[in-house]
Image (cartoon, helix red, strand yellow):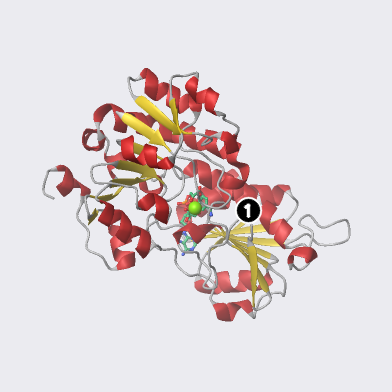
Amino acid sequence: MKIGCPKEIKAQEFRVGLTPEAAGEAIAHGHEVLIETGAGAGAGFEDDAYTSLGARIVQTAEEIFAEAEMVVKVKEPQPAERRMLREGQVLFTYLHLAPDPEQTRELMESGATCIAYETVTDGKGGLPLLAPMSEVAGKLAPQMGAWTLQKANGGRGVLMGGVPGVMPANVVVIGGGIVGTNAARVAAGMGADVTVLDRSLPRLRHLDEAFRGVFKTAYASRAATAELVAEADMVIGAVLIPGAAAPKLVTRDQLSEMKPGAALVDVAIDQGGCFETSKATTHQDPVYEVDGIMHYCVANMPGAVARSSTMALGNATMPHMLALADKGWQQAMIDDPNLMEGLNVHAGKLTYYAVGRALGLDVTSPQLILKGGD
Ligand SMILES: NC(=O)C1=CN([C@@H]2O[C@H](COP(=O)(O)OP(=O)(O)OC[C@H]3O[C@@H](n4cnc5c(N)ncnc54)[C@H](O)[C@@H]3O)[C@@H](O)[C@H]2O)C=CC1
Ligand SMILES: CC(=O)C(=O)O
Ligand SMILES: [Mg+2]
């Protein structure tokens, strides 16, 4: 199979979909790999790291999209990329369709087969292709929140760890999954007073046992969430209902109950955000203010640490990328129902139910498509 990897074009996105290592594995499996020149440079992988393993460098994204049978990326395709996708082509990348009707429509119009990293499962309740980036974003969130809390950035001027005689920052993390756990660990490591809220009692039980004393846990009832948010210096939004639009857990009205200059870090922004007042921002201009509360809502946080993130993502995507290339997407999905969960769009049809529910669109099941019922 011809596998193509373009340079990412989202603002300040320095990750790349294929590491030289993954490209080399694909070549060893008998595939042809095309890399757009400079695609890996932002992550520290120059063109010759790919060519030395047998990949071919091409000069433009147009050539990648024209030639490749499968395009491997990081971020959701931007409008210019969507226009180059074509019928029969496989796209393997993050998509985050639920909050993005325009992208969903254009992917359906392209006729391509679009497989979303973030909805591939592992059979144990996990999302193995989201997890590494959630680990990164979770570890970054307190760091970004601490920066947002600084006066020069509009924040309340509170130091995460406090100093002797002065209380540390009060950090509330909503959602105790991968992002939330990593965020809580780092915030606690910085010396903050941390509470993690979740709706899953088994998850809270696990966190309590695994991290006893490092941070506190609380059940995410509406009342407890409102009370803890009102007391917080920093709130980190880290909830997920896989594939679906994020639930809004802090309303605009609640902002007036919060401490002026408090920081909201909405990591769940890629699924639409879990604060009513969230809107996606970029690394170039990451923070804005609503009713005196500072919002940090960067939808591609791991891009800030592109080298670590590219390697972590590459480790997770490689086996799936190889299965898709070796067997073709249909057989790979028949053999692996967890990979089938990644199918979001095929040949003009939406194939993921949570996206259909979020956008009010009809959905065809992947099983029906694989049976040839499309
Ligand atoms: N902005 C960025 O750059 C990045 C964003 N993300 C996003 O971060 C979000 C979280 O991802 P993960 O931690 O991997 O998900 P996860 O599935 O590991 O954890 C989500 C947690 O939220 C909890 N939850 C669901 N509804 C809740 C509610 N109403 N109240 C309290 N808790 C609730 C679940 O029980 C679960 O423990 C996702 O939207 C993901 O796409 C991930 C990586 C990078
Ligand atoms: C998960 C995601 O959206 C990201 O890593 O940018
Ligand atoms: Mg994102």
- Disc 1, SS: helix
Q: Is residue 120 above or below residue 244?
A: above
Ligand 1 has an atom within 8 Å of the beta carbon of the residue at disc 1? no
Q: Residue 79 placed where, x, y %?
A: 41, 56
Q: Does residue 354 appear in the picture of this structure?
A: no
Q: Does residue 66 appear in the picture of this structure?
A: yes
> Which residue is pictured at 74% across the width and 64% down the height?
153
Q: Residue 41 placed where, x, y %?
A: 58, 35
Classify residue 193 by image quadrant.
Answer: bottom right
Query: For the N terminus, which image quadrant?
Result: top left
Q: Is residue 27 above or below residue 361?
A: above
Q: Residue 332 placed where, x, y %?
A: 26, 33
> Which residue is pictured at 45% across the width and 45% down the height?
130
In this rendering, position of residue 368 left or right of residue 2: left
Q: Relative to the observer, which residue lies in front, 220 or 118? A: 118
> Which residue is pictured at 17% across the width and 43% down the height?
370
Q: Relative to the observer, which residue lies in front, 7 or 176? A: 7
Indicate the amino acid at tag 1.
Answer: Ala
Classify residue 109 by image quadrant.
Answer: bottom left
Reading the image, the residue beneath label 1 is: 141
In this rendering, position of residue 234 left or right of residue 365: right
In this rendering, position of residue 37 left or right of residue 325: right
